[in-house]
Amino acid sequence: MKDASRHWVSTIEFERLSSGLPRKSLMRLLRRCDRTIRDWQTGRRPIPAWTADTLRLYQFETRKAYREMFGCDPLE
């Protein structure tokens, strides 16, 4: 985490990190119900900072697994 005092994530950053993930996968990954995810996406509720950290870690682990399996970066 960049700053220990940071408590919330912007909707734009959340959308950028969660793009490409179906809502069901997002629900399972973040362990939150559909309504909570929908409220975060529409801006009705603030998005906790731990969600961005969890999504970054998921992306990192996914890329690492891809590199181990195929020997190249998936973004190349």
Image: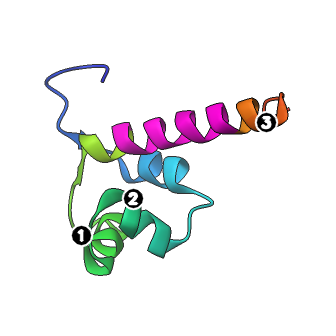
Residue 24: percent from left, percent from top: 46, 75
In the rendered image, which quarter is residue 59 located in?
top right
| Between discs 1 and 3, the one toward the N terminus | 1
Q: Which mark is residue 29?
A: 2
Q: Nearer the viewer, residue 37 or 59?
A: 59
The type of residue carrying mark 3 is: Leu
Q: Residue furthest bottom?
A: 35
Helix or strand or loop: what does disc 2 sit on?
helix
29 on left or right of 36 = right
Disc 1 crowd rating (10 Å Cα; few below 14, some 14-19, many 20+) is few
Disc 2 versus disc 3: nearer the observer: 2
- Say above or below: 43 vs 12: below
Q: Residue furthest left?
A: 5
Q: Check disc 1 and report the residue beneath it.
A: 44
Q: Nearer the viewer, residue 13 or 54?
A: 54
Q: Check disc 3 and report the residue beneath it.
A: 75
